[in-house]
Amino acid sequence: MPTPNPDPLQLDTLPDSVRRVVSALQALGHGEPPVMLDAAARTAQQAADALGVRLGQIAKSIVFRHVASDRAVLVVCAGDRRVDEARVAAQVGPLARADADFVRARTGFAIGGVSPVGHAHAPLALLDESLWRFDRIWAAAGHPHAVFPLLPDDLRRWLDVPPGAVTLPPQA
């Protein structure tokens, strides 16, 4: 099973996208730096397996295209949940799929490494309330090998949005 790399991060060796997240976290006063995983964690399941945590503890970032403004819509939800596009659209307006080029242009991150902070352009953001089942969660840090620990309340404060119901009910 892949494990986090225990070596301290050397900023000068990190990809630019991870350095941008590190800078954003520092500006937000977050004291826990990202960790680099030995293997890529492009999916929530891969990240959970690499960290040895529950799938729901992975705060996955899903990006849509806001039709009216062409802005990114960032939905942060628990890794064990699926985004309900109808609920999201009811809150922000019509949505379209975001392809890899759109995600990179609007967020500055590749799919599989989209962080909730450090975006190239401020997204419209929504938080799913299911993240508050956990005391500690993990989010992508700008690269498929990089993640960082945080609290659900950190997301609420950093993104300045209240949590709400934006996912489908869990399947039994």
Image (cartoon, helix red, strand yellow):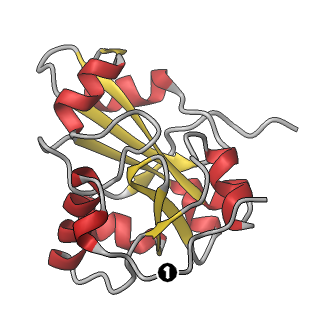
Task: For residue 93, say whether it is visible.
Answer: no
Along the line of sight, the residue nearer the viewer: 162 or 43 = 43
Q: Say whether residue 86 is visible.
A: yes
Vertical comparison of 31 with 76: above or below: below
Compared with 99, 44 (above or below) is below
Give x and y (percent) for residue 111.
41, 33
Q: Residue at x 54, y 32 (%)?
A: 83
Judge from the rendering whether residue 148 lies leftward or rightward of residue 73; answer left or right.
right
Category of crowding for the residue at label 1, using alpha-carbon neighbours closer than 10 angstroms: few (below 14), some (14–19), many (at least 20): few
59 sits to left or right of 124: right
- Where is the C terminus found, in terms of image quarters? top right
Which residue is found at the position 27% from the left and 19% from the top?
Answer: 101
Side of 72 where 58 appears, left or right:
right
Q: In which quarter of the image is the N terminus?
A: bottom right
- Report the residue that reaches farthest toward the front: 13
Q: Which residue is drawn at 69% across and 46% down?
A: 45
Snapshot quadrant of residue 117: bottom left
At a point 39% along the width and 82% down the height, the residue shown is 32
The foreground one among 142 and 70 is 142
The amino acid on which the numbered mark 1 sits, given as a three-letter code, is: Asp
18 shown above or below 90: below
